[in-house]
Amino acid sequence: MILVIDDDSAVRSSLSFMLKRAGFEVHTVSTPAEAIQFVRVTEPRLVLMDMNFSLTTTGQEGLVLLKQVKVFYPQVPVILMTAWGSIQLAVEGMKAGAFDFITKPWNNAALLQRIETALKLTAEMNEQKEDAPAETTLLRSNIIGKSPALMNVLNMVGRIAKTNASVLITGESGTGKELIAEAIHMNSPRAKKNFVKVNLGGISQSLFESEMFGHKKGAFTDATADRTGRFEMADKGTIFLDEIGDLDPSCQVKLLRVLQDQTFEVLGDSRPRKTDIRVVSATNADLRKMVSEHSFREDLFYRINLITIHLPALRERKEDIPLLVRYFADKQMKQNGLPPVEFSPDAMQFLMRLPYPGNIRELKNLVERTILMNMKPVLEAADFEAQYQRIDSSREASANLNGLTLEEIERRTILHTLQLHNGNLSQVAIALGISRAALYRRLEKYGISVNS
């Protein structure tokens, strides 16, 4: 039973017709009093409710009614209905316990999808199948570890992957947020469709619409051919919005409209296009703080984090470090055709003591670098300590690069790496992640002699 609460008879009729055609049982009421009378004796599966029931548009009646419904049935999802200009009111409702909100006029397909998501997700959460072996059936997407902190995350992934709920993945840089996003997609009904990754921190404001929505040939000066946008590429699949905290405020508005209506317009084509996507976002920023500082839109924040998954830092799951070290070593052996390598007990103890501000990414870099620099069958703590100190000194050397051009930074980096490796060009090329030929070209470009 879906309960519809709205004082507009046309809205009630329209929603009732749509929901009944979709196979739902529907009951409609026009006032908060009728709604309370109904919920006193009947538990709805979901509530669709307007926020205003009088000539005023403050929404206070709606907020009061929402809180009353949640007192009767805290587990029942409530979806709010409001005008686009009153989104702030819907945000207040989300804070008070609403599951989601839609704006009028709504898109029928998008609304039905949100209703189905709310019902499915609520059912999943209410079942609380702690004994379900989620970790044995979950496709983990190269996520390595078995610590309690990581298993809690994976159990959450297993529960919410089957739904269409928007997910916000938070955590420090290098904790593996992209892998969690991939796992959500791989374990969802959308797994056979595209998983489209977008680094929002790398898209400028001027290119945002073209990158995300696409453009037609001739839409602007440099548009020499049609371009398919990321939202169109992700249709029926999942779009992963990485570094969403870096998104420019003006682009946040454009993104919000697409996530709200699941429609967009290609530049140079005024015909709206529909997209059926699951949105997974990630950030290492404190979005709540950004909202309070007015640098991130509150309505967008509530739109993207229906479910929040926080990834623990590597220092909070140190029991996973031996498994990660073995995984990175085996991968390095396979990729480069190297002989097997083992780690002494003191080496592993050393690795487990490090703070890892760069998290898993830092551990991976340290393991691979130490293997390539030593080429020994058994690595000792001293081998890792030497490379860790060099990485540490590289951090210090790069701390004062503000105001330099990219070429100046590159030249300084090469000089510093030459010094670290006493002019050994093979080791310098490995440390910089480039070929010897590329290193020679850069030495010639910057006039650096091998003996400098």
Image: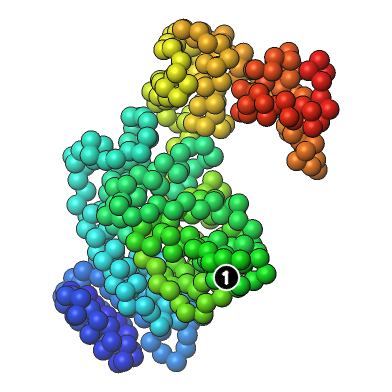
Q: Residue at x 82, y 20 (%)?
A: 449
Residue 84, position as x, y percentages in the image: 48, 79
Measured along the vertical axis of the image, is residue 25 above or below residue 303?
Answer: below
**Residue 285 at what x, y percent from top left?**
56, 49
Amino acid type, callout 1: Lys
Say which element carries label 1.
loop
Query: Is 449 on the left or on the right of 286, as rendered?
Result: right
Query: From what the image shows, is residue 113 above or below residue 319?
Result: below
Q: Quadrant of residue 326?
A: top left
Residue at (52%, 16%) from the top-left corner?
371
- Residue 394, image quadrant: top right
- Badge 1: residue crowd in 10 Å (few <14, some 14–19, many ≥20): some
Q: Is residue 24 left or right of residue 309?
A: left
Please indicate, yes or no, whether residue 397 appears anywhere in the rendered image. no
Q: Which quarter of the rendered picture does the C terminus lie within?
A: top right
Vertical side of 427 occupied by 150: above or below:
below
Q: Is residue 369 visible?
A: yes
Residue indicated by mark 1: 217
The residue closer to the viewer here, 305 or 78, is 305
Rendered location of residue 306, percent (x, y)? 39, 59
Q: Residue at x 22, y 58 (%)?
A: 123
Residue at 27% x, 40% y: name it: 138
Q: Quadrant of the N terminus?
A: bottom left
Give residue 122's position: percent from left, percent from top: 26, 59
According to the image, what is the colour scheme of the structure?
A: rainbow
Q: How many marks?
A: 1
- Closer to us: 448 or 383: 448
